[in-house]
Amino acid sequence: MADDFLGEWRAWRAAREERLTAPHGFLSITGMYWLDEQPQRFDGVPGAWSVGADGVEVELGDGEELAVDGVALTGRYRFGTVDEAGVRATYGDVVVEVAARGGDVVLRPRDPASPRRAEHTPTPTFEPSPAWVVPGVLTPAPPDATVDIQTMSDGAAQPEPLAGTVTFEVGGREHALVALADDDGWLWILFADVTSGVTTYGAGRQLSVRPPGPDGAVVLDFNRAANLPCAYTAFTTCPFPPPGNRLPFAVEAGEQDPAHR
């Protein structure tokens, strides 16, 4: 096995673990709360939170304080309408994330002292193999095409930008996966396979694919098949693979279920 293949894979694994265990990464989330018009208080989070026609609002009580971009907040503060990227406020080391998910708004505290983060051990993986670096071809979708993706939080389907369909061969047979459009021309593929729920996380995994060449050529490196955040914590809104993105063979490459050690 070429040293550059192994070296690049190890660098990818190190970066994955670094993001996962970052002070305010997914392992630091301590709760997931849905906002509505009624002001609500949540454990460990200052203020009473609500969302209405004018967006997200927090009412801070006496002695309570948050900060946004380093500016201290007291009393009533209106964040306005939030998108999927959301906004973040801080108190001490804790970050309060407020973001849109579908037609709703979720609040999630991210605490570096989370026990889940402290107890994390590296994710198990299959042995990397160049045999799982597979060439493919993207057939582009029409402009502005979307595909409905269901989320684990409430089962609601949300339209996502569709890049097209990637075809490739494994074991002498042609297979196809629907690819979503990601940032900077990259493709995002959500898939399940025969290992799902056995040695890999049951809801499936994800694969980031570099932008296709002029002829649609892409490379699927299944050694970099990665878990979605819901494999590590229930405090997420993970997507399910689109219908048809279940492969009829075992992809024994990439990350395994964190519980499978």
Image (cartoon, rainbow, N blue to C red):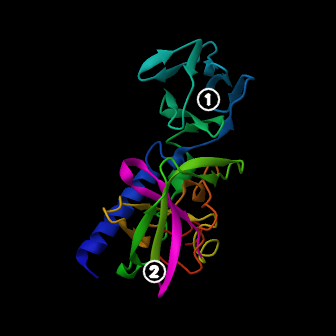
Q: Residue furthest right?
A: 38
As helix, strand or loop, the secondary structure at mark 1 comes to: strand
Q: How many marks?
A: 2
The residue under the point 69% across, 35% down is: 34
Counting residues from the N terminus, which is met first, the one under dot 2 or under dot 1?
Answer: 1
Q: Nearer the viewer, residue 183 or 227?
A: 183
Residue 131, how many percent across, how many down?
Answer: 38, 82
Which contiguous range is marked in magenta? 170-193
CB within 8 Å, label 2 to label 1: no
Does the magenta segment cover residue 149? no
Tell me: 155 left or right of 194: right
User: Does residue 126 appear in this view?
Assistant: no
List the residue tagged with mark 1: 45
Q: Residues within 10 Å of mark 2 (few under 14, many from 20)?
A: few
Q: Nearer the viewer, residue 60 or 118?
A: 60
Residue 130, how many percent across, how many down?
Answer: 35, 79
User: Does residue 189 appear in this view?
Assistant: yes
Residue 159, how many percent across, how many down?
Answer: 60, 47
Q: Is residue 217 above or below residue 69?
A: below
The residue under the point 24% across, 72% down is: 4
Identity of the amino acid at label 1?
Val
The residue under the point 47% across, 42% down is: 24
Q: Nearer the viewer, residue 203 or 175?
A: 175
List the residue tagged with mark 2: 169
Q: Nearer the viewer, residue 206 or 230?
A: 206
Does the magenta segment cover residue 171? yes
In the picture, residue 96 is in which quadrant?
top right
